[in-house]
Amino acid sequence: MTSDPILQGLRTAPALRIEGARRECFEDCVVEETPIALLYNGRSHAVMMATPRDLADFALGFALSEGIVEHAEEFELVDCLRGEHGISLQAMIPSARFEALEQRKRHLAGRSGCGLCGVESLQDAVRPLRRIETDPRIDSAMVRDGLRRLAE
C-alpha cells in the first residue's frame, strides 16, 4: 500500500495486450477493491466492497444515505483497522440512533453482484477459493464474438 493519496486504491497487475498476432506482457495499474466492514457502537452492521480510498467519506456517506444518522454531527469515525480479510470502519452514533438501527437491522440476500449483500463481518465475506484443476484456453475469436454479442 502506498502512502501517496493519489495512488491509494490502485495496484499493479500483470496484463496481456493482444493486437492481431502481436502479444505484449506488461504491468498495468488497476483499481483495488477490498471488503469494508461498517461497525456502529461496536456492533457489525454490513460489509461492502469498495476501494480503500476516502474511507471516512465513505463511512459517513453510507451512514447518511442509509438513514443511520440524520446529520453528520451525529457520526464519529473512531477507528479504521486494516486486517488480513479487509478493513473495519468503526464509528460511534448516538444511543437513540443505534437502538433504531438495531430495530430495523437489514438482512439482504444478494442474488447478483459481488455476493456480499447481507454479510455482516469480514470473516463471513472472505471465503476460500476453489482450486481450478484445468488450464483453460480461450480462443480469441470467442472473445471477439462475445464482445460483439454483448454490444448487440
Image: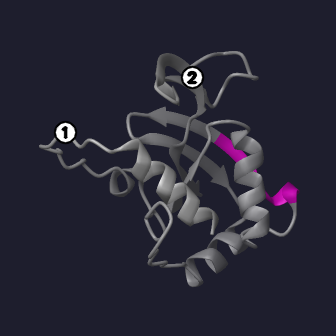
Q: Does 4 appear above or below 114?
A: above
Q: Is residue 37 above or below residue 81?
A: below
Q: Residues within 10 Å of mark 2 (few under 14, many from 20)?
A: few
Q: Residue at x 53, y 36 (%)?
A: 81
Tell me if 140 is positioned left or right of 103 in this view: left
Image quadrant assignment for residue 63: bottom right
Kindly check if marks 1 and 2 are in contact, taking CB atoms under 8 A apart as contact: no
Task: Indicate which label's residue lies in the foreground, 1 or 2.
Answer: 1
Residue of label 1:
135
Q: Tag 1, which secondary structure? A: loop
Whether residue 42 is visible, yes or no, is no
Taking the image as shown, residue 64 lies to the left or right of residue 123, namely: right
Q: In this view, does 86 lie above or below 145?
A: above
What's the residue at 59%, 37% (across, down)?
80
Classify mark 1: residues with Cα within 10 Å, few (<14), some (14-19) or many (20+).
few
Instruction: Identify residue type, mark 1.
Output: Asp
Q: In which quarter of the image is residue 52?
A: top right
In the rendered image, residue 92, in percent from the top left (x then y), is placed at 67, 54
The residue at which mark 2 appears reads as 28
